[in-house]
Image (tube, helix red, strand yellow):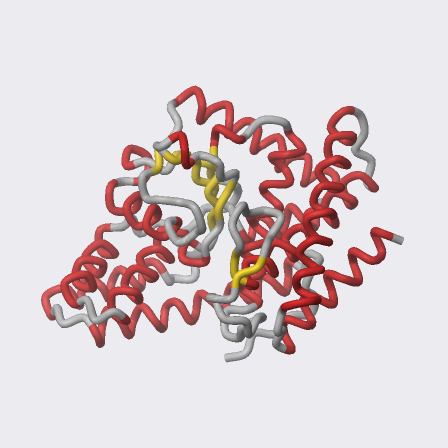
Amino acid sequence: MELQFRTTLLPDADDLRETITRLIDRLETSFRHLLLEVWDSPKNKAKAEEKLKRIFSGQGRPDSRIFAAHDAMVNAALSQDEPGFNTTCLQFLQLPDEVEATGLRVRGLSKIELGSTACDLLRRAYCDDVGLTTDLLAPGAEAKKQATAKINQAINMMEKYAPDWAREFDLLAPQVYLATNRDPKKSGFGGATVFAAFGSILMNFNKIDILPRVLMTLVHESSHAKLFLYHLDDPVILNEDTELFSSPLRSAPRPMEGIFHAAWVSARMVQSANCILDNGLCGPDAKELRRQSSQAAIVYQDCATQIEQHARLTPLGQRLFDDAQRAMSDVRS
């Protein structure tokens, strides 16, 4: 099924809502195939059927833990890991039935808050992001309280000065998980987003400080989620993953798809920052947000140069890149 979009770079909550609805329909179809046709467990089929009915009842949408369970099941099935597939199916049955609540939810990525099964599935899902491991440490009570307050302040700023961006964020990433790498030598990440945990982003609670930077991290990470939806079926880049290129956001060369993602989300950071500034943000936060936007514009241009010189774009990729180029050209002019 081809996913159609009316816009690309800028927010379009109505279009995005329709796309997510289609995504959930596909998720349910896949779950039914995996659990009721592939899984050889007659004694659990009735349980699986009832659980799917509860989750996909139409009241809300499945949260990121359900997506993480599906990803683990698919990976085990594709690798023909029968014991692993059986384990992940059983893990799915152990997950809470609750669907995603409306509004932002900030939680530590811990067994205490999420349960052992959900925490394990989410850690494995986020491990797909570059530089992350499953050995993640959740914040203590006070650190979580401070991080949550700052994230809520950033969302409130977005709602006040860029309501279209806020509505889109609520669709893309209403769940924020907090963690840092246990090994201090691997704690440099600011945030992470993976399609395997769609509906959520991971933020490093040690990196949550000044308000404009938190705001830009939220836009940055949720923009990755939006781009994942665009190329859910069709690629944007034809370059092989073995082709590596320099990137302003990584110390080591990276595949072109990563550079494309960095360019696109950086363009979105600039656009959202300009929207907030144009709608009246002033004072020290405005000054810092301009600085953050300028840095994102530099990252965009560095990535765009690599894309122009080395990327082999699909028609979809060309459309997405052209939209970003036009938006950034307006900023430069």
Percent across and percent down for residue 262 are 61, 54
Please identify the quarter of the rendering in which residue 162 is found.
Answer: top right
Give the side of residue 49 with respect to residue 25, left or right: left
Left or right? Give the position of 279 relative to 7: right
> Going 81% across and 29% down the picture, which residue do you hit?
282
Is 100 rendered above or below residue 40? above
Please state the horizontal and vertical placement of residue 6, each as a whole percent of the image: 69, 70
Q: Position of residue 145 (x, y in %)?
A: 47, 24
- In the image: residue 47, left or right of residue 273: left
Between residue 315 and residue 113, name the one nearer to us.
315
Is residue 208 visible to us here?
A: yes
From the top left corner, tell me how far across and down residue 291 is, in percent: 75, 35
Residue under the point 68% across and 56% down: 11
Q: Is residue 315 above or below residue 276?
A: below
Farthest residue, direction top? 142
| Residue toward you, 197 or 310 | 310
Q: Is residue 107 visible?
A: no
Residue found at x 85% / y 52%: 332
